[in-house]
Amino acid sequence: MIDRRIARDGIAIGVASGAYGVSFGAISVTSGLSLWQTCVLSLLVFTGASQFALVGVLGAGGSGLSGAATGLLLGSRNTLYGLRLAPLLDFSGVRRLTAAHLVLDESTAMAINRDTRETARAGFLWTGGAVFVLWNLATLLGAVAGDRIGDPRTYGLDAAVGGAFLALLWPRLRDPRNRVVAALGAALALCLVPLTPAGVPVLAAGVVALGMGLLTRDAVDPTELPSESDLP
Amino acid sequence: MIWAAVLVCGIGCYLLKLAGLSVPPKVLEHPVVERIADLMPVALLAALIAVQVFSSPGDDGPHLVVDARLAGLGAAVVALLLRAPFIVVVFVAAATAALLRLL
């Protein structure tokens, strides 16, 4: 039953991201990429923020090198997610090579608030898998349809993204230290929005986690998942 | 040129994801590293929410705006306080923003 709920929530996130995949496909072809380039981008890069940044730079007349560099900068937050996911999911070999492609904001958020390794894996794989399938189908649809589909904001889909991530973060905000980290991270990111290129503000919030991790001693977080040794 | 950018970005982004997942467990068992790794998603997701809700791309670069997205987030908070399931929270956020824009 729990697994079914995890699957349902994962697919719901996939549907929401799919709506953005459509707009990505449309924006990509209007930025000058071909249908094939657009679809390969979604299949290979498979990180929404990096893809939007890459086609944004290319569309604005930037070089391929600066486009790829911006995309990579945005993609580096997935490395930080991987640090948390590695002991939690405990994948090795081919399974790790496959799972790595699914490391995203969405799949991380759906994995970190679970009680057991089994449910963390289920949350990660259902969400990552659903987003992969729907994001790529939606990219193709958007690239074929171009800008005839309309603005996703009309349906409030831009607000759905914020709501979805808040819902995923919510259980962890019961802990006071997490609340402080979340508030400082959000505040720092907002201060940097007008000053830095897209992607930097979110990445910079990692400094807050770094500082708080170094400065605080109390290790026990009631909302934290059991550590490696506690897991079955 | 575009193909090169697509391939470099694709392969690079994959390796960035794999690098995080491949950090040896020994390193992550250190209490300080464990604490930082645990707080990292909290800080990044909170920042992501803030940027998603307040940031708007402009001609002179991104800037902060208050619009229907904030109402959507507020509605999501209310839904969460009422212990609504995930899908309901997402729907309420989207519907609130969409209705506000319709007015």
Image (cartoon, coloured by chain):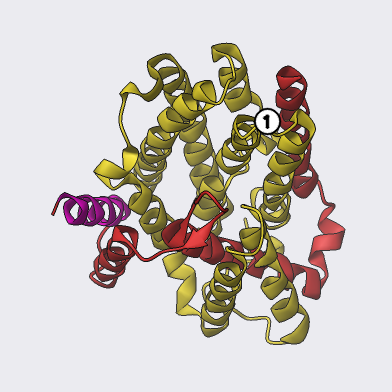
Chain colours: A yellow, B red
Over which residues does the magenta segment extend?
B86-102
Quadrant including the C terminus of chain A: bottom right
Left or right position of A157 against B26: left
Instruction: Give the chain of mark 1.
Output: A
In the image, residue B8 sits, relative to residue B80, either above or below, namely above
Disc 1: which residue: A98
Is B85 inside the magenta-drawn segment?
Answer: no
Q: Residue B66 sits in which quadrant?
A: bottom left
Left or right position of A57 against B72: right
Q: Residue furthest front?
A: B60
Q: Where's residue A89, x and y in %?
A: 65, 48
Q: Which residue shows up at 76% across the image and 42% down it?
A: B16
Left or right position of B48 against A196: left
Q: Residue B30 sits in which quadrant?
A: bottom right
Left or right position of A57 against A180: right
Q: Of residues A62 and B21, which is closer to you in this image?
A: A62
Q: Which residue shows up at 79% across the image and 74% down it?
A: B31
Packing grade of label 1 (10 A; few <14, some 14-19, many >=20) is few
Q: Where's residue A166, x and y in %?
A: 42, 62
Q: Amino acid at mark 1?
A: Thr
Q: Which residue shows up at 71% across the image and 21% down it?
A: B2
In the image, residue A170 sits, relative to residue B22, either above or below, namely below
State the predominant SS element of the stretch in magenta.
helix
Quadrant including the N terminus of chain A: top left
In the image, residue B53 sits, relative to residue A24, either above or below, namely below
